[in-house]
Amino acid sequence: MMHTRLLAVLAHPDDESFLMGGTLARYAAEGVDVVVVTATRGEAGQGDPDPKRNGQRRERELREAVAVLGVKALQVLGYPDGRLAQVPRPLLVRRVLDSIQAWAAGVVLTFGPDGISGHADHVTIGEVTREAVMSVEAKVGLFQVVPSPATRQCCRRGAGAFDATGLTAVDITAYRVLKVRAMQCHRSQPQPFLGEPETIAGQLIDHEYFRLAWPPVGAFPPTDLFDAPGRPSR
């Protein structure tokens, strides 16, 4: 199998587990080097009222979660939570581009224009990541997570009427237990599922959905994240 790498570029601790935990766990189990880049420590989120302590706590939870998912490496950029849009755009693009190039990523996952929840940090990191991918000379497939039954279930955010046309659906049936375990690592955040992961995993939606944002897709969306146009099959 070709040595492949997948890079998830996200805004906060817990994005990786709630939005795409099954996908990350699946590809890691299949031999892909999975790397998570998180722009902030989530210090403005729920948890400890002291921002510094909260950021430390949420980073610890994040490290536990990515270990559960089988992630090879984690990079926390440390930008201020809730204020990503105020960081100079060229600096953010450069940091993301450095990560893409350092890991020789073949596929990059991030937010789409909606940011799933409309959170400014989500929207900003999605835009920045798209700019970075489009500036890379090597061919990189960029996929954006989209509102779906899976995001509605785990993040309480999603589309009212869902249409999977043109999307890449990743079957996470065999990895739902790992997704639950990773979500439960984020103990400071509201939990959509409480209880034994092995017992409640069957309640999870069995697919996570992504839209190919770059390179342009033809008439049919790729059925695998590594089958995007110009990308070598695994």
Image: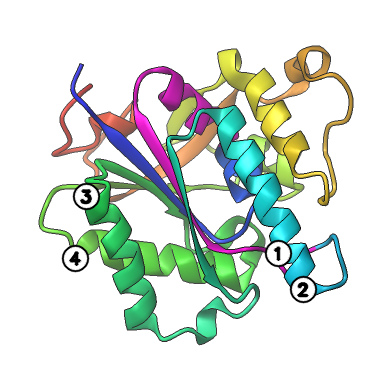
Circle 3 SS class: loop
Tag 1 residue: 55
- Three-letter amino acid code of the residue under disc 3: Pro
What residue appears at the point 85 percent right and 60 percent down from the top-left corner?
A: 47
Helix, strand or loop at label 2? It is helix
The stretch of residues the image draws in magenta is 21-45
Mark 1 or mark 4: which comes first in sequence? 1
Q: Is residue 22 magenta?
A: yes
Q: Position of residue 64 (x, y in %)?
A: 65, 38
**Residue nearer the viewer, 131 or 93:** 93
Q: Which residue is mark 4?
A: 135
- Identified at 34% across, 27% down, the residue is 32
Relative to the observer, which residue lies in front, 50 or 212?
50
- Looking at marks 4 and 2 on the same chain, the residue that comes earlier in the sequence is marked by 2
Name which residue lies at 65% across and 35% down.
Answer: 150
Q: CA distance from mark 3 to mark 1?
A: 35 Å
Residue 5 vertical position relative to residue 104 in the rendered view, above or below: above
Residue 139 appears left or right of 152: left
Q: Quadrant of residue 51?
A: bottom right
Up the image or down, 160 lies above or below 209; here it is below
Q: Which mark is residue 215?
A: 3
Task: Select label 3 or label 1 by which is in front.
Answer: 1
N-term-proximal mark, 3 vs 1: 1
